[in-house]
Image (cartoon, coloured by chain):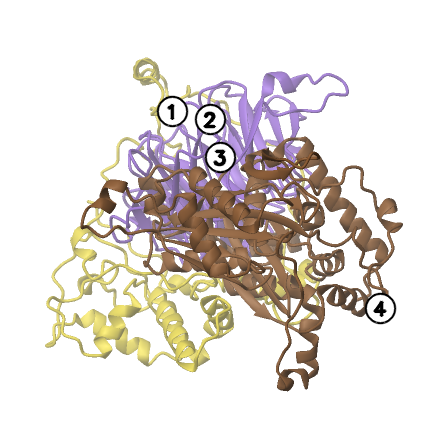
Chain colours: A brown, B yellow, C purple
């Protein structure tokens, strides 16, 4: 009894300062007013396979322009996270202009007054690029440099395959860690499975759970709220090309079970324990996503609904050979900085690069799996590299809509060549 | 929780003595401008530099106070430092600042004062004030000769307040009273049973319970029509409306 | 949020009860000048409890009488139908009704809760009923005339901190606690549950991100409820549309333990808690803090507005003191 009373007092006082500061609402907060994505489709075989990289990027930018709920001319900057897009700065700028940003009135262009068009930049930190785009915009707003910004994530892996690392300097190759940077991601997955004793069963179980959750969410129509349909060319059987409106993800495999996944052979015989398969790894996928951010003051002025407050994003470095553990480093770093514990977080959206790193991270951090990737993750939905960071925000904020008790949300991913990133959002949708 | 040390994750509401609050940043206490609005305090004696004598005495008392000999302060201090640091790294200067604030808070509460730490800093850096410091809690004319008695605010009630409670003031403690840390330590060590406790029998009072004679008084938010009816009914009752059994009047008080 | 309108208000009266920390206080609904204090030795962590009956006069605050209990008294409720009776609810689950004209033992006792009873509320509409909230997760409704409880509500809240009768709607009871959810119960339908059918609240809503430690019904606006708790924010809810609070007040730097609407003003309420302050707020047209008190030196667990004097607020604390503030 007495012990319970002491614990009660301790609980009342714990984390109070930290959490209350985070939950306070200030006019200078950076808030998300829109977070949406295109459908995610299997590379080379899915609905986007016949669209060119530019076409898909233009469609993504159009979807953004049409769904951000504000005059695009108000946007202070656009940052596009993308990893494999060749000539990415060119592609991004051209696509934005093609999609109709900046929308400076034609009349203005005829006058001598300079027309201020919305600038564009790209950012590339591999799998975190979509999140880096959000962080970049958020920081610019926080610094008062812009008031409204658009973060975009994009990847077309059908057209721009991941060919792996380039050649490095001899000095780099002379170091073990340098050589580690040449290795494919599958190798890192096997390293995590082997070094941390992750069983094949646990990996398949996580993968099946991801598929089942995504299947259920798709069937229940949950994704419809976060997906913006896009129209892309598709080659028909007779050789003609039709423009088709794509509305749903096509990577989700209905009826997936752990038993079924267990039958799939390991993909990397050369790297024991050879537990990573096509069934328990993220899919190669095409897709785009976008997040509109602004100050709370601006959102209120424009009468825009506030989905969430972006509190912070951190990144961390770790050993390239086990890059998958990234979230297990970046999430604690984020939480410690903010004086929070994992128990303070209501929902997690952690990128499922591989089931190996998911099982490891969830276990290492002591997370409740029922709070992680509640509508499935990259194993079911796909991992278009640069898109994922923004896609995660769209997915988790959509999931949080129906979970009024979920206040603090963490998104995170591992990053190739040994990094991790994590962000904290405060879901304001329920109140 | 079987160690001798108080569990580091328990809050220390501190000892019974008014040690600086455990998990609370030093309060932003009344500003200099505060007191004039509430207190009808008598004019204060000021020193040549404009600082009230009472305040000077407080500062001098503070600076000569033996904090290291004060058990209650010492046992509460680590928790205060930890709480004020809030998990952030601190430089040595930060810690000094935290300790100074904790000491000031403790000492001013001891003296029944609410003079903020900032005021003390200003005095110590000899900043000139355009008008004398006033504190609603420390008024020269109200300072009792016994330095440890708490001071009461005057002027906010129209009748002179009763003399302060026994001169031991804030440090008054029942002989077997334990500090918060003492209690927590005992409980953590599984020795809660050692806490002196009276055995109160489970039983009903043998004396006859009193009989209710008053009808319910309408609450302020209940209809006024109802209120009038009740008043007139009660007027004729044996007991006066709203009078305590000891006869003291509860009619609208002077305040 | 507007900045505080005024510096801390000092207490007009204050009193100390050596050896006893306070957890709750209530003004008598019959006598202007009488306050009951729910108290306990050793900060209520272990040891005896005590109900103090305090007399308030311009001359000061004086303990008229006190009653001892085996375990800490966490809350009290004055009998709305009997001017001399006050109910104490205790850490060992015991309920004890004391007659303030007597001394010593209680005149009635109940014991059903299996953990700390931390809330007690007497119905203003049905003056024979009272409710209790307990860490055993249940709220119970009792009648003074019955030896056993009338209804036990499984609030599902983990520790239940608050069970309150609506001041406007007979048979409407609110509960709130550890799971941060407010539940409203229609006591008529829970009185005779159909076999095999679990008690269900009429409505429930999440009232914040953390534990709710205190709640109170507005006395003038039917259906309006204030909640407060671990996150230190006072929220006002219109229970007819609880999707979002109608007001949120931030100012406390730590968890809040008590919140109470003014008996005299429809849009004023007070709160107190671990940051040792008590704060008075106005909620309309926009929420603002209008007073703060900072005279306590320990957790300010107890707070209560005087029922028959406008602007009079009492607070009591683990620092063993009772303070009375005027014109707040």
Image location (x, y in percent) of residue A310: 46, 52
Q: Secondary structure at mark 1?
A: loop
Q: Would residue A237 appear left or right of A401 to someone viewing this image?
A: right
Residues beneath discs 1 and 4 located on the same chain: no
Residue under circle 4?
A270
- Callout 3 touching callout 2 (CB < 8 Å): no
Q: Quadrant of residue B112?
A: bottom left
- Rounded to the nearest angstrom, the CA distance separating label 3 from label 2 is 42 Å
Image location (x, y in percent) of residue C268: 33, 35
Q: Earlier in the sequence, mark 2 or mark 1?
A: 1
- Rounded to the nearest angstrom, the CA distance separating label 1 from label 3 is 33 Å
Image location (x, y in percent) of residue A388: 59, 52
Choose mark 4 or mark 3, whichever is in front.
4
The one nearer the camera, A225 or A360, is: A225
The one nearer the camera, A360 or C118, is: A360
Q: Is residue A71 above or below residue C166?
A: below
Q: Would residue B120 appear left or right of A176 to someone viewing this image?
A: left
Which residue is drawn at the image coordinates 31% and 57% (left, top)? B164
Q: Secondary structure at mark 2?
A: loop
Q: Quadrant of residue C262?
A: top left
Residue under circle 2?
C241
Q: Residues within 10 Å of mark 4 (few under 14, many from 20)?
A: few
The one nearer the camera, B142 or C75, is: C75
Choose mark 3 or mark 2, whichever is in front.
2
Image location (x, y in percent) of residue A106: 27, 41
Residue under circle 3?
C100
Q: Is residue A69 above or below residue B170?
A: above
Q: Which mark is residue C221?
A: 1
Q: Secondary structure at mark 4?
A: loop
Q: Residues within 10 Å of mark 1 (few under 14, many from 20)?
A: some
Choose mark 2 or mark 4, whichever is in front.
4
């Amino acid at each position: 009894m007495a012990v319970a009373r002491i614990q009660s007092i301790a609980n009342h006082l714990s984390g109070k300062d930290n959490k209350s500061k985070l939950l306070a609402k200030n006019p200078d907060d950076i808030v998300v007013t829109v977070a949406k994505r295109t459908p995610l489709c299997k590379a080379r075989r899915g609905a986007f396979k016949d669209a060119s990289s530019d076409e898909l990027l233009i469609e993504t930018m159009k979807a953004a322009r049409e769904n951000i709920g504000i005059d695009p001319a108000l946007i202070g900057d656009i940052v596009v996270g993308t990893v494999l897009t060749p000539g990415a700065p060119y592609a991004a700028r051209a696509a934005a202009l093609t999609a109709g940003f900046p929308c400076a009135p034609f009349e203005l262009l005829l006058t001598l007054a300079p027309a201020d068009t919305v600038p564009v930049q790209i950012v590339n930190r591999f799998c975190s690029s979509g999140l880096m785009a959000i962080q970049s915009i958020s920081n610019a707003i926080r610094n008062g440099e812009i008031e409204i910004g658009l973060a975009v994530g994009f990847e077309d892996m059908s057209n721009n395959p991941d060919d792996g690392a380039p050649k490095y300097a001899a000095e780099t190759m002379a170091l073990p860690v340098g050589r580690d940077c040449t290795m494919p991601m599958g190798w890192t997955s096997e390293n995590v499975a082997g070094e941390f004793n992750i069983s094949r069963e646990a990996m398949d179980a996580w993968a099946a759970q991801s598929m089942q959750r995504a299947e259920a969410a798709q069937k229940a129509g949950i994704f419809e709220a976060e997906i913006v349909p896009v129209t892309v060319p598709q080659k028909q059987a007779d050789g003609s090309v039709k423009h088709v409106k794509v509305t749903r993800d096509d990577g989700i495999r209905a009826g997936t079970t752990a038993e079924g996944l267990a039958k799939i052979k390991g993909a990397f015989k050369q790297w024991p324990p050879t537990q990573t398969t096509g069934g328990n790894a993220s899919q190669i996928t095409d897709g785009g996503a976008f997040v509109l951010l602004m100050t709370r003051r601006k959102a209120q002025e424009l009468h825009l609904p506030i989905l969430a407050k972006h509190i912070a994003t951190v990144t961390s470095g770790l050993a390239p050979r086990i890059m998958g553990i990234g979230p297990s480093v970046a999430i604690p770093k984020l939480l410690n900085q903010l004086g929070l514990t994992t128990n303070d977080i209501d929902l997690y959206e952690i990128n499922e690069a591989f089931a190996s790193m998911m099982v490891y991270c969830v276990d290492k951090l002591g997370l409740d799996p029922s709070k992680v990737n509640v509508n499935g993750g990259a194993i079911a939905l796909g991992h278009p590299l640069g898109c994922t960071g923004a896609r995660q925000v769209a997915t988790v904020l959509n999931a949080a809509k129906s979970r009024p008790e979920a206040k603090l949300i963490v998104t995170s991913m591992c990053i190739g060549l040994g990094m991790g990133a994590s962000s904290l959002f405060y879901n304001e949708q329920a109140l | 929780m079987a160690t001798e040390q108080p569990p580091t994750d328990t809050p220390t509401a501190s000892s019974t003595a008014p040690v600086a609050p455990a998990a609370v940043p030093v309060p932003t206490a009344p500003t200099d401008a505060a007191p004039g609005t509430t207190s009808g305090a008598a004019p204060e004696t000021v020193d040549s530099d404009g600082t009230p004598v009472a305040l000077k005495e407080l500062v001098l008392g503070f600076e000569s106070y033996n904090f290291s000999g004060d058990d209650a302060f010492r046992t509460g201090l680590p928790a205060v430092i930890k709480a004020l640091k809030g998990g952030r790294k601190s430089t040595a200067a930060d810690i000094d600042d935290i300790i100074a604030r904790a000491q000031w808070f403790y000492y001013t509460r001891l003296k029944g004062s609410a003079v903020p730490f900032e005021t003390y800093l200003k005095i110590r850096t000899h900043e000139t004030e355009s008008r004398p410091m006033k504190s609603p809690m420390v008024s020269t004319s109200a300072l009792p000769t016994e330095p440890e008695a708490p001071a009461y605010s005057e002027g906010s009630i129209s009748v002179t307040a009763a003399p302060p409670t026994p001169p031991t003031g804030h440090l008054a403690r029942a002989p077997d009273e334990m500090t918060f840390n003492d209690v927590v330590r005992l409980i953590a060590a599984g020795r809660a049973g050692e806490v002196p406790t009276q055995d109160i029998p489970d039983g009903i009072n043998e004396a006859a319970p009193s009989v209710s004679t008053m009808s319910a008084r309408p609450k302020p938010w209940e209809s006024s029509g109802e209120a009038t009816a009740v008043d007139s009914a009660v007027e004729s009752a044996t007991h006066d409306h709203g009078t305590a059994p000891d006869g003291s009047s509860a009619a609208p008080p002077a305040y | 949020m507007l900045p505080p309108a005024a510096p801390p208000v000092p207490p007009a009266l204050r009193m100390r009860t050596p050896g006893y920390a306070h957890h709750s206080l209530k003004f008598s609904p019959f006598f202007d000048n009488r306050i009951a204090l729910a108290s306990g030795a050793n900060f209520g962590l272990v040891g005896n409890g005590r109900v103090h009956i305090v007399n308030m006069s311009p001359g000061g605050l004086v303990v008229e009488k006190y009653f001892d209990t085996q375990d800490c008294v966490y809350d009290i409720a004055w009998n709305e139908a009997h001017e001399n009776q006050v109910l104490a609810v205790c850490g060992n689950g015991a309920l004890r009704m004391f007659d303030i004209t007597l001394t010593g033992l209680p005149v009635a006792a109940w014991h059903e809760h299996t953990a700390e009873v931390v809330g007690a509320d007497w119905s203003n509409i049905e003056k024979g009923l009272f409710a209790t909230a307990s860490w055993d997760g249940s709220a119970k409704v009792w009648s003074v005339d019955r030896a056993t409880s009338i209804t036990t509500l499984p609030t599902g809240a983990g520790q239940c901190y608050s069970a309150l009768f609506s001041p406007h709607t007979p048979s409407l009871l609110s509960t709130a606690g550890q799971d941060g959810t407010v539940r409203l119960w229609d006591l008529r339908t829970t009185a005779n549950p159909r076999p095999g059918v679990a008690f269900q609240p009429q409505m429930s809503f999440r009232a914040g991100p953390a534990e709710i430690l205190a709640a109170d019904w507005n006395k003038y606006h039917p259906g309006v409820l204030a909640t407060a708790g671990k996150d230190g924010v006072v929220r006002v809810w219109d229970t007819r549309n609880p999707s979002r609070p109608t007001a949120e007040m931030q100012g406390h730097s730590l968890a809040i333990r008590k919140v109470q609407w003014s008996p005299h003003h429809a849009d004023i309420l007070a709160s107190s808690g671990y940051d040792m302050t008590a704060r008075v707020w106005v909620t309309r047209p926009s929420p603002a803090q209008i007073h703060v008190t900072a005279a306590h030196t320990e957790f300010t667990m107890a707070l209560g507005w005087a029922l028959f004097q406008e602007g009079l607020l009492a607070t009591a604390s683990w620092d063993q003191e009772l303070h009375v503030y005027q014109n707040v």
